[in-house]
Amino acid sequence: MPATGCRSAGALPQTVDEAFVKALPKAELHAHLSGSVSMKTLHGMWSRKRASGRCLKLLDPLQAMLSIAESVDIISFFPLFDQYIYQLLDDIESVQEATRSVIRDFATDGVKYLELRTTPREHAQTGMTKASYVHAVHEVIQTHNNSYDVVCEQSHDIKVYLILSIDRKMTLEQANEVLDLAMTLRTGCVVGIDLSGNPARGDVETFTPVFRRAKTEGLHITVHFAEVLASATQRELEVILSWEPDRLGHVICTSEDVERTIKERRTGLELCLSCNVLAKMTEGSIADHHFRKWRMTSCPIALSTDDVGIFQSPLSNEYLLAAQHFELGPQDLVALSKSAASIAFGDSQSLRASLKTFETYFQAQGYGC
Ligand code: IMP
Ligand code: ZN
């Protein structure tokens, strides 16, 4: 069902449909690498590994991922990575293939600016270390960005940056190791660090020295924030806000006090409609999502997918859902995409230029009227 919005003279078309949201140049700011790999790519890896006698106990991703997507909730969600996806992405070759395919999938969906985030991970059997993992992902992104600069083909028309994630179950030493890796690659495509992982685990106070050091070093900070009640005590939220994060992800179980601070600071918000509803992190349907509330504030919002490989809703569909459930018209969606571009950690110039061209084109077409 197309979504409609008000139209003034010379504005964008009235109707938002699949073609419009796909063509809209977009920024994806909250995407976990391992959660963004498509079933098709995982299936290809699974088939090849099985042919060489590996992963024999793993179900075919075409079956496994579908049943996961149907029944996933925030409790069953995290073991899925350790018990399934990481068993397939267990060596450098697979990690690089996954990174390439994720970039390609976002590009195909009309994403022009992408910040991928990933947690440094090791795998003893294949000899993959945290450092070799991060360098492998970084190399793919750098190669991609360089070919984008030179060749500028359509399929390469997406600028990619990397954020390294600290998992809530890490020790202080492990978290410092992540920051050290990020520092080493900041002259490449690494733009910041993130705190993620099972929100029921860990004490965020552990990471205060790391996030303070990141801030001093000038790295950007984004944090998964108030995802569930267990990770939304007043103390936890105050500790995180004391790190002065540039952006916050999810922002679901907040108190009035906390919301006031976020609004005063105009912190960037990464909001994920399908992920929150499907994983039952929010009550009700998309129309009840807190996007409605935050949209009325001056906090810039970046609609995001979180884990498109699991939730199966590409970014273009998140824009379509926003249009359908929050009565947004084409002009509102362009504004939303600009809002995401405004809180990008890397250089979003080319996205802004694409948005300008897009707006001019559609104004001239009077599309959908
Ligand atoms: P990776 O960091 O590339 O391996 O992506 C998967 C990891 O991201 C998971 O193991 C989690 O630690 C984290 N992650 C993915 N989705 C979420 C989320 O919604 N909340 C918190 N952490 C998440
Ligand atoms: Zn996330």
Image: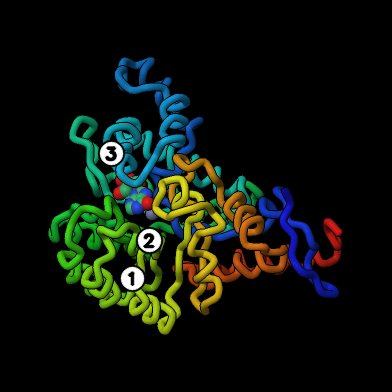
Q: Residue at x 48, y 68 (%)?
A: 344
Question: How many residues crowd around disc 3 within 10 Å: few (fewer than 14), some, or many (20 or more)?
Answer: few
Three-letter amino acid code of the residue under disc 2: Val
Instruction: Identify the residue under disc 2.
Output: 190
Residue 245 on image: x %, y %: 34, 73
Mark 2 or 3, nearer chain start: 3
Instruction: Identify the residue under disc 3.
Output: 79
Q: What's the CA distance linking mark 2 and mark 3?
A: 27 Å
- Give the SS element for disc 1: loop
Q: What's the CA distance linking mark 1 and mark 3?
A: 30 Å
- Give the SS element for disc 2: strand
Give the quarter the ligand 2 occupies: bottom left
Q: Is residue 187 visible?
A: no
Residues at marks 1 and 3 touching, judged by CB atoms closer than 8 Å: no
What colouring does the structure picture have?
Answer: rainbow
Q: Residue at x 58, y 49 (%)?
A: 107
